[in-house]
Image (spheres, grey):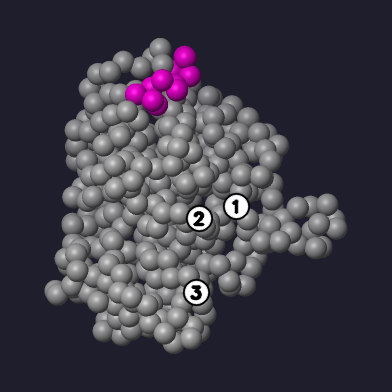
Amino acid sequence: MRKELSLNRRAVLRAVGVAAGVAAVPALGAVAPAAAASGVRTARVPRTRAKSVTGAAARAVRADFPIEYVGVTWNGPKRGAGIRLIQQDGSRGAWTVLQPVCGAGADRDAGDSAESVSVLVPAGGAAGYELQLPAGATGVRSTAMDTVNGPSKEVAAASTVGQFAGVEYITRAGWGADESLRFKADGTENSPQTYYPAQTLTVHHTAGANGDPDPAATIRAYYYLHAIVNDWGDIGYHFLIDESGRIYEGRYSGTDGIPAHDASGKMVTAFHTSGYNSGNLGIALLGTFTDQSPTAAARRSLTQLLAGLSAYHNLNPQAAVTFVNPVNGVTKDVQMISGHRDWLATECPGTTLYTDLPALRADVAANLPQSAAARSVPVRRSPA
């Protein structure tokens, strides 16, 4: 029954996705002249340029391209790190405290997640940077990235927007995912897709800058940080949401046109809760929500996406459940809609957003389609 339902949705989603407008897609560049002349609308997306340095040399780096983001990873204390940007004229800015991105990773890294630190910093076209790392930091690696100004590629505009679970989203092609980053030098896929029934939905923040002027470029930077620097093989989340409320497809899930799932409705495993990834869907809001709330638009999109996913998987958003990792049998008692800190020792999704989760669950339940709401009862359950 699930397979038939999913396949029917697949056909509908394809039809809706082709018909959907592209006004919600952030600007990716000019329409190609030849394509415009032929009547086929395309957008240009810049390729990512990066320079990665390890060890002591990672603490002072210059690049031959404008640095738009700096990714820093290390093992050890999370506090006590800082960065100072070097501008194109050689001047040095003030030291800024590094705020760690919420700890996550592939399940194979579960034992190391407590000590692994990852940070992404907007650099605004700097020429270089200097780092201060806490005492005892090991395995230091810093990566200068340019996801804005590099050579561009063309993507068909019809492939940049889709609809799924009642919401419109920007596809991987729409935000400029370079699919080659998923593959190793020998051509094999770094993290081949595996699929399991969805059991829980987990909310994150990226712990990045608020007021982001170019969220698609930021997502491309997270993609490179996760796929290449962290060696996960892809971006860690299933979906991301920017401050304007735009929803972005995350982890690659195949060519069937259904984001985060295969054609049968099973969910692809991502890398957002190390040790608890399989069967656990992750949604990240771009920004930091430790002392401030998400924008109304982002909160509304998060509610709608969670409601659509709850209905799609017949999950009760207000239930308490026992998550069972289908790979190794590890269990965890959580809310159906949880925050990252419910799984691991992390500040994610920020104190303000985490405090809002009870109200969010109620809002999601109120936004369920009537048929789905009728099936939902607030009981603890273990997955079949």
* 149 relative position to 106: left or right: right
**Mark 3 Cα-neighbour bin, 10 Å: few <14, some 14–19, many ≥20:** some
The Cα–Cα distance between marks 2 and 1, rounded to whole angstroms, is 8 Å
Label whose residue precedes the other's in the sequence (3 or 2): 3
Between 321 and 358, the one lying in front of the other is 358
Where is residue 33 drawn, in percent x and y? 80, 63
| Magenta region, residue range | 362-372
- Is residue 366 within the magenta segment? yes
Magenta-drawn stretch, dominant element (helix, strand or loop) = helix
The residue indicated by pointer 1 is 26
The residue indicated by pointer 2 is 215
The Cα–Cα distance between marks 1 and 3, rounded to whole angstroms, is 20 Å
Q: Quadrant of the C terminus?
A: top left
Q: Are marks 2 and 1 in contact (CB under 8 Å)?
A: yes
Label whose residue precedes the other's in the sequence (2 or 1): 1
Secondary structure beneath label 3: strand
Report the amino acid beneath label 1.
Pro
**Mark 2 Cα-neighbour bin, 10 Å: few <14, some 14–19, many ≥20:** many
Label whose residue precedes the other's in the sequence (1 or 3): 1
**Mark 1 Cα-neighbour bin, 10 Å: few <14, some 14–19, many ≥20:** some
Q: Residue at x 34, y 36 (%)?
A: 201
